[in-house]
Structures are given as C-alpha cells and as structure tokens.
Amino acid sequence: EVQLVESGGGSVQPGGSLRLSCAASGFTFSSFSMDWYRQAPGKEREFVSGITWSGSTSYTDSVKGRFTISRDNASNTLYLQMNSLKEEDTAMYYCRRQNGDYWGQGTQVTVSS
C-alpha cells in the first residue's frame, strides 16, 4: 500500500523558514518523480515544486529562489526547504507521487506576524 506522510509544518513569522518532510512507503521511492502541492483556504490546489526520479527539479515562479526540493532515496523521504516565507505561502502542503496520483494527508504551514 502506497503511503505518504507529511510533517514539519507549523506557524512562523514572515521571513522565517520551515522544512517539510514526506515519508514514503509501499513503493520503490527512487523510481518515482515526486511533487509538492499546496492549497490555501478558498483557493484551488496548486503545484509548488517537483523532483524527478533522476533529481531534476522544477518550481512555480512564486517560490523560485526561496524553496528547495530534495529527496533522500536511502530513507525514502522527500523534503521541501522553505526560506524567506511570506504570508501568501500560508496553506496546507501536500506531497504527491506521480504515476498513480497518490497524495499524503497534508501539513499546515501558517505564516503570520
């Protein structure tokens, strides 16, 4: 059974940092491309960042230069390092496995002064 469990969310002030983690199980993690998405209240879920099985990365424009996606295939974990956080980054963050469209339960990120 594919399982994705996010952690690392929390409340921070603008300019702060958080690192999200997504623990994957039930599949060969190193063989799949993975994504981070987010959904703010009243808005549609949106793509944030992705990393292919080979390590190529992509980002939505609003987070370029502030967020970094990475993966540790030895521990089956996906990461999202978020720096210089802004209030508009407030959302529920989800990890997603491509090829089969599996999602985690999400972790809340709140950026507020």
Image (cartoon, rainbow, N blue to C red):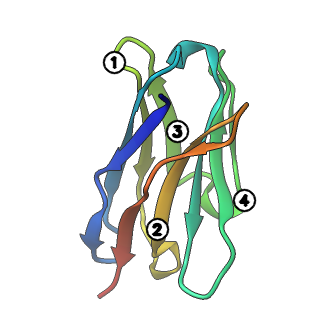
Pinpoint residue 3: horizontal percent, then vertical percent. 44, 35
Closer to us: mark 4 or mark 3? 3
Tag of residue 61: 4
Q: Residue at x 36, y 77 (%)?
A: 111
Closer to us: mark 4 or mark 2? 2
Image quarter of residue 11: bottom left
Callout 2 environment at 10 Å: few (<14), some (14 to 19), or many (20+)? some
The amino acid beneath tag 1 is Ser
Tag of residue 75: 1
Q: State which tag comes first along the sequence, 2 or 1.
A: 1
Quadrant location of the C terminus in the rendered image: bottom left
Q: What whole-number distance in Å separates the C-alpha atoms at marks 1 and 3?
A: 15 Å
Q: What whole-number distance in Å separates the C-alpha atoms at marks 4 and 2?
A: 18 Å
Report if the CB atoms under discs 2 and 1 are less than 8 Å apart. no
Callout 4 environment at 10 Å: few (<14), some (14 to 19), or many (20+)? few
Q: In the visual, does 81 lie left or right of 55?
A: left
Q: What whole-number distance in Å separates the C-alpha atoms at marks 4 and 3?
A: 14 Å
Image quarter of residue 4: top left
Of the pair 39 and 55, the residue shown nearer to us: 39
The amino acid beneath tag 3 is Ile
Q: What whole-number distance in Å separates the C-alpha atoms at marks 2 and 1?
A: 24 Å
Image quarter of residue 106: bottom left
Pinpoint residue 24: horizontal percent, then vertical percent. 42, 30
Residue at which label 3 appears: 69
Residue at which label 2 appears: 92
